[in-house]
Amino acid sequence: MAFELMASMMCADYRNLEKEVQELEKGGIDSFHIDIMDGRYVPNFAMSLNDLICIRSLTDKPLDVHLMVEHPINTIDLFTHNLKKGDTIYIHPEAEYHPSTTLQRIIDAGITPGIAINPGTSIEEVKMLLRIVKKVLVMSVNPGNASQMFLPYVREKYDELLAIKELMNIKIYWDGACGSDKIKEYAPLGVDGFVLGTTLLFGKKASYGETLSRIREMRF
């Protein structure tokens, strides 16, 4: 069973970011998830453009850039200019007056377009955007902080998306409170990838390679 594992880099040890990237890559991570927060759309500041540029220079693996910022159209070129084909940018539709315009800018730059869906956002609200994006990042916690509790009602959102996945030609990704139990349950159902943070990957005694191998060797 094929599914992607992405490292949530806001949870990494910033005392030696280069080593973190190298160890994750050596351990078999599929991509690096970059959370950009502006302190307005979400009540927190996280990674910055400079962090993105640094990580992009350290690896050839894809980057998944999650923009938790107000009106990303105003700064989208700063991000697309520092990414390459195969990288992804997710925006939150609620953060933009005309999200389709921002998504088209991402497409025009040769970057994979995606949307991130908050726990309180219904699939019906963003359904038309599913026809122009390639990836959907479903938040199973409220955006803005690591180490939050899973919100059980989000299960319905995954079920709705999985039912229309082939029709819309999208990939579906899990972000937030991702433990091995969630991977075992939802990878067989068709969720394409999982963002790994403090619940499963970072701050553990096991090496990144050991953790990632254990996930991939789970019985489904």
Image: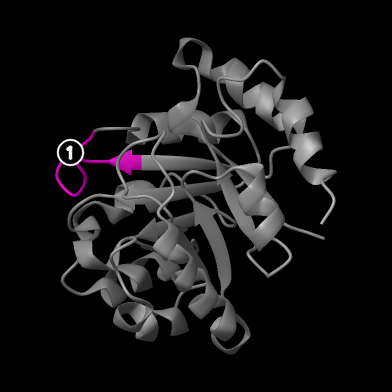
Question: Which quadrant does the C terminus fall into?
Answer: bottom right
Location of residue 148 in the rendering, given as x and y in whole percent from the top left corner? 38, 39
Location of residue 80 in the rendering, given as x and y in whole percent from the top left corner? 40, 53
Q: Residue furthest bottom?
A: 167
Crowding at mark 1 (Cα within 10 Å: few <14, some 14-19, many 20+) = some
Does 24 sit above or below residue 168? above
Does 81 sit above or below residue 154? above
Q: Residue at x 40, y 58 (%)?
A: 90
Residue assigned mark 1: 39
Q: Residue at x 49, y 66 (%)?
A: 155
Q: Which of the 4 quarters of the picture holds residue 163?
A: bottom right
> Is 81 positioned to the left or the right of 174 in the image?
left
Q: Which of the 4 quarters of the picture holds residue 190?
A: bottom right
> Is 198 positioned to the left or the right of 21 in the image?
left
**Residue 205 versus residue 23: which sits nearer the camera?**
205
Report the colour scheme. Answer: one colour
Q: Residue at x 28, y 64 (%)?
A: 120
Q: Residue furthest top?
A: 15
Location of residue 147 in the rendering, given as x and y in whole percent from the top left corner? 42, 33
Q: Looking at numbered disc 1 in the image, what kind of residue is underneath it?
A: Gly
Q: Secondary structure at mark 1?
A: loop
Location of residue 115 in the rendering, given as x and y in whole percent from the top left corner? 40, 65
Q: Is residue 106 on the magenta stretch?
A: no
Q: Residue at x 63, y 64 (%)?
A: 191
- Residue 147 visible within the image: yes
Query: Taken as a whole, is the magenta stretch helix, strand or loop?
Result: loop
**Residue 164 versus residue 153: which sits nearer the camera?**
153
Q: How many marks?
A: 1
What stretch of residues is rendered in magenta?
36-44
> Is 118 positioned to the left or the right of 32 in the image?
left
